[in-house]
Amino acid sequence: MSLRDLIEQRNKQWAAFHKWEAAQPLEWRDPSDILADVSAIWDWLPREVREKDPDPEKKGVRAMHAALSHLKTART
């Protein structure tokens, strides 16, 4: 399967998800229930996937901290 085919397949999956999501009623959910759902999804991943660090240099965390520090100084 080519990269173009993979991207097209993924876009179809996202389109189906967005269609499904738009049909769902909006309702408030307790944050602990949401975290439990995320935890369950995490547990479904194979162990080797959970153990691999996709960002060993923590660039994403550093970018988030930089953005948060900017917001903090902007509000004071």
Image (spheres, rainbow, N blue to C red):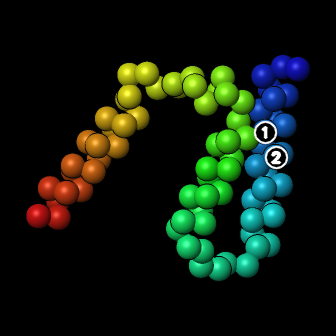
Residue 38 in the image: above or below residue 52? below
Please report the residue visible at 77 percent of the width from the left and 32 percent of the height from the top. 7
| Image quadrant where residue 9 sits | top right
Residue 44 in the image: above or below residue 75? above
Report the number of numbered marks: 2
- Label disc, if present, on residue 40 of the rendered structure: none
Q: In the drawing, does residue 21 fall left or right of residue 51?
A: right
The residue lying toward the viewer, choosing from 44 and 17, is 44
Where is residue 44? Give x, y as percent.
Answer: 73, 41
Q: Is the C terminus in the top left, top right, bottom left or bottom right quadrant? A: bottom left
Mark 2 is surrounded, within 10 Å at the Cα level, by few (under 14), some (14 to 19) or many (20 or more) other residues, namely few
Q: Amino acid at mark 1?
A: Arg
Please report the residue visible at 75 percent of the width from the left and 59 percent of the height from the top. 18
Q: Which residue is mark 2?
A: 13
Please report the residue visible at 54 percent of the width from the left and 65 percent of the height from the top. 32
Where is residue 30? Give x, y as percent.
Answer: 56, 73
Where is residue 64? Give x, y as percent.
Answer: 34, 43
The residue lying toward the viewer, choosing from 50 and 10, is 50
The residue lying toward the viewer, choosing from 50 and 60, is 50
Q: Amino acid at mark 2?
A: Gln
Marks 2 and 1: in contact by CB < 8 Å? yes
Q: CA distance from mark 1 to mark 2?
A: 5 Å
- Label disc, if present, on residue 10 of the rendered structure: 1
